[in-house]
Structures are given as C-alpha cells and as structure tokens.
Amino acid sequence: MPLAQGSPQGPVLPPVQGSTLGLALPSAAAALPPGQGSVPGPALPPGQGSASDVAVGLRANALQALGRQVVGLRVGVIGLAAPPALVRTGPGAPTYLACGAVLLVFALSCALFRGWERFGPLLTRHRPLLAVDLGLCGLLLVPPTPGSPLAFVSVCTPLLAGLLHGRPTAALYAAGQAAVVALAAGGPLPVALCVLAGAAGTCLRDLLTRFAAAGGVLTETRARLAAAGAVRAERERLAREMHDSVAKTLHGLALAADALARTTDPAAVRRRAESVARGARRAAAESRELLTDLRRHPEAPAVRLPEQLRRIAAGAELRITGTLPVVPAAVAHHLLAVASEALENARRHAAASYIGIEAAAGPAHLTLTVEDDGRGLPPGGPAATSPGSAGHYGLPGMAERAAAIGARLHIGPRPTGPGTRVRLSVPLAALTAPAGEGGP
C-alpha cells in the first residue's frame, strides 16, 4: 500500500470570497468596509460594530467606575477629617453650622455613591451639574476656618471633572475650587492639591482612552483571526470531502474514458461506455451528497458502525471485536473516511492479495485497523506523501480527520509480514452519543 502513489491531487478550492464559502460561512465571509483589504470581517457583538465602538464602551465603563471610587474617597475623607475640623471650630453657632454642613454633605455623598449607576451618567452628560458638587464641597468650609482638614475634600470635584469631561472642564473647576479653598481655608497646600487633582483626572482619562482604544483594536483583531481560522478550517474540510469523494470518482472516470478511446472491439466499447456512464452517475450522486452535507443540521442521528463498515469493506476481510459503541454522526463520518481512504489506497496501489479491516472496542479506546500484504510504504515512509510532494492529499486528510476527533493515527509497516498497517485509535470519551439513538 505505497502511499506515495496515493489518490489523485485534490481539487483547487476557490478564493475565500467564493460563492461556496459564502454559503457555508455567511457571517465569516462578510466583506470589510472599503479600504480595509479583502480578509473576511466578522460581525462583532451588538453595539460593537467597530474597534472605535468597543473603545468608547470600555472607556465609558472604566471612567464611570473610577468616578464612583472618587465619590467613595470623598465619603472616607469627610469621615476622617470631620472630627479634627469640628474641634477647631469656634463654640456656639459656628459649631452647629459646621456640623450641619458636614452631615448634609456626607449624606448626599453617600446617596451619590450608592446611586452612582443612575447619577453618574447624568454628571457625564450635563457638565453644569458639577457646579452643584463644587457648592457642596464649599459648604464644608462654612464658617471659614483656616487650616481646616475638610479643605482636602475639595480635591474630589476637580478630579471628577478631569475624569468625566477632560482638560477644559477640569481646568475650569480646578480654578474655581482652588479660589473657594483659598478664600475659606487659606494655605497653599489645599489650593495646589485642587490644581493637581484636575490634572490627575485629565491624565487618567487620556490614559484610559488609549488603553480602551488598544483593547478595542485587540478585540476586533481577535474576532477577525477567529473568522479567518473558521474560513481556513472550512476550506480544509471542503478539500478533504472533495478528495475523498468526487475527486476519486472523476479520476476513475478519466481512466475509463482513456481506455474507451483505445478500444476497437464493439462489445468492449459497450462495456466501457457503460462503465463511464456509471462513473458519471456516481460522481453526480457524490456531488449531491457533498452539497447536502454542507447544509445538513449538525445534530444528525448517531451512527452504528458495524453496518457502515460492512458497506465500505467490499473485497476486504472485516473483523469486529467487542461491542462497538453508537457514535455521533460527525465522529463516524471521520472514522469511516479514514478507513475508506486506507482501503482505497490498498486496493489501487498495494498489489495486495489480502486486505483486512478490524474494529475493536477496548476499555478506553475504539481502534480501527486497516492492513494489507502488498508492496508496503514508499522510501521515506509516510512523510513522502506530504501535501507538497507530487500533489498527494490523502495522508494529510487522514491526519486532519484524526486530529478533528482527538484520535491517534499511526501509519507504518505491517508487523506480521510485508505490507502496510493504518491504525486509528479514538478515546471512548470522544464517542459519547445520546442513548437510544440509532443510525443509518
């Protein structure tokens, strides 16, 4: 069974933009917008039609989360700074006024923190609302107390402005808050912190914008790579199916037609013409079966292997050991295709007097073995039949099918004599099928 003389070259598939792949993978073969090449562009999740949309969504979520943390920071600073600030306040009415301002701002800040999902977007859409926040922070400085720790609460408004609205708004509110703090509390440190808080918020916003843009591009790139991988896998699947069905029949049909052209005996001409007609009908049937398979629902009924093995084992000795499990249709398709390819190579090229196929069910694996007593492997072994060597696609197709179902494929010399042995071992875990389902 010299695989170097394997089946004829597989067909050349159309480009990715061809109609066949367009039918098989409509979502993966969608065209890109003008100016973005011809690689298929996948559809992103709803509301994320491009990298810019993804970036905007990521940035908005991150900024809203940071804004809520800023409000939480203000609540904590008020709780820490209120006691020493009240101690510094003069007795009588100023103390009552300061306590009222602290309680009011603390309660409103807690409410803003808890309801940030509702109030945060309002602050983002309406910039003047930050003036209310600035006024609340100013209440903490009433009555004016030089050196009051509550002055540090004022940094939150410029920080929020920088995060939610960027540089111009941050500069405006930082200047306003710094002026209020300078008039009420004095001291250069709180004033400088207000300015620095606005700059820090703006820098964080710019940094998140860049990270979000990079994340959006990465998301779209991953989606495009996944779509390209799906297209490539579909092309390989079509190549395997066409090689294992229509290509072989057409090759035999061509050989029969060549023989017919060299025949002069009328009776022989009639027989060969009938053979050509049968081959043409078989090629048409296989083409229809291939097209039907492309449109077949993935949840096809499970398959009983013994009946299918008897169908493909014509002219070979079939042995079944143990009770073969009922397997999913997709797995059975790959198993039978590998066995059919091995049998076809043995019949055509091995010049064998014996061809056998054995299916054995063990404790953990299902094993299919095809062996013959023919000429054996070519020089160089199975590596001589790589896709680039003389246009042979049988062995790569067998290896791809084995990998698709998690099986191990071994091709080597027959251990008990001359010839070749093809052995496919599939874990039973890959053969799970709903109980009670039959098969064709």
Image (cartoon, rainbow, N blue to C red):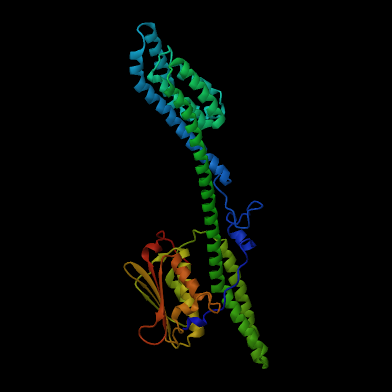
Image position of 157 with respect to 234: above or below:
above
Picture coordinates of residue 422, whole percent (x, y)? 42, 77
Residue depicted at x 51% and y 59%: 298
Residue 133 in sight in this render = no
Query: Horizontal and vertical percent for residue 293?
Result: 55, 64
Q: Please tell me which residue lies in front, 286 or 50.
A: 50
Q: Is residue 244 left or right of residue 144?
A: right
The part of the image, by quadrant, that contains residue 309 is bottom left
Residue located 66% across and 53% down the image: 35
Query: Where residue 282 sits in the image (x, y, percent)?
Result: 60, 75
Residue toward you, 45 or 331: 45
Residue sitting at x 45%, y 72%: 307
Q: Residue furthest top?
A: 92
Looking at this rendering, what residue extends furthest in the bottom direction? 265
**On screen, 293 above or below 103?**
below
- Say how many tags the image has: 0
Q: Judge from the rendering whether residue 281 lies leftward or rightward of residue 86; answer left or right.
A: right
**Which residue occupies 48% across, 88% down?**
351
Q: Is residue 249 left or right of residue 328?
A: right
Nearest the eye: 52 or 20: 52
The relative height of residue 195 versus residue 62 in the rendered view (above or below) is above
Residue that lies at the very extreme toward the left in this rendered image = 363
How far across and down, in percent of the image, does residue 254 sit? 63, 82
The answer to which of 114 and 375 lies nearer the viewer is 114
